Image (tube, rainbow, N blue to C red):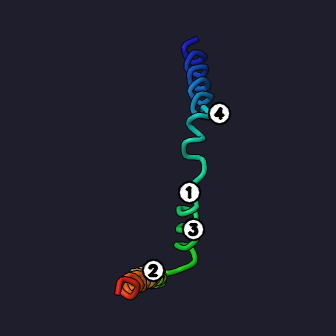
Amino acid sequence: MQAATQQVRKADRTRRTHAVPDLREVRANAFPSVTDALRAVESLLLSGGQRTARRNAWTSVLEDRRRARDRVEAQHVLEAAADRTSSAT
């Protein structure tokens, strides 16, 4: 009798551990972000040094774009100041 009870308890524990999880729990972490997915693919395809080089290159590209925006903005400010000065005289 005791052995049968233990088997039922073991089967019940197994059913509970392999049961379908609550959907609210699954949705929270079911899909990785695009960034996480790209980093996972990157880690599979590239060695550590290549990854670092690629990230450094991308950082340089972003910095160059920022500098270019700053140059254009400064040029607009200088042109506006020159227009105000020439019309005031």
**Lower position in the chain sequence, tag 2 or tag 1:** 1
* x and y, in percent, of residue 28 in the image: 55, 42
Residue named by callout 1 = 33
Residue named by callout 3 = 38
| Residue 49 visible, this angle | no
**Lower position in the chain sequence, tag 4 or tag 1:** 4
The kind of residue on which mark 2 rests is Arg
Q: Single out the mark in the foreground, 2 or 3.
A: 2
Instruction: Pick whichever, 87 or 26, lies toward us.
Output: 87
Instruction: Pick whichever, 3 or 61, lies toward us.
Output: 61
**Lower position in the chain sequence, tag 3 or tag 1:** 1
Residue named by callout 4 = 20
Q: Is residue 57 left or right of residue 13?
A: left
Quadrant for the N terminus in the image: top right
Q: Residue at x 58, y 70 (%)?
A: 41
Determine the residue located farthest toward the right in the rendered image: 20
Q: Secondary structure at mark 2?
A: helix
Q: Is residue 89 left or right of residue 35?
A: left
> Disc 3 to disc 4, how far (Cα)?
29 Å
Q: Residues within 10 Å of mark 2 (few under 14, many from 20)?
A: few
Q: Secondary structure at mark 1?
A: loop
User: Splitting the image into 4 quarters, where does residue 84 fall?
Assistant: bottom left
> Disc 4 to disc 2, how far (Cα)?
53 Å
User: Splitting the image into 4 quarters, where does residue 5 fall?
Assistant: top right
- Residue contact between numbered discs 4 and 2, judged by CB atoms under 8 Å: no
Q: Residue at x 57, y 77 (%)?
A: 45
Q: Secondary structure at mark 3?
A: helix
Residue named by callout 2 = 69
Q: Residues within 10 Å of mark 3 (few under 14, many from 20)?
A: few
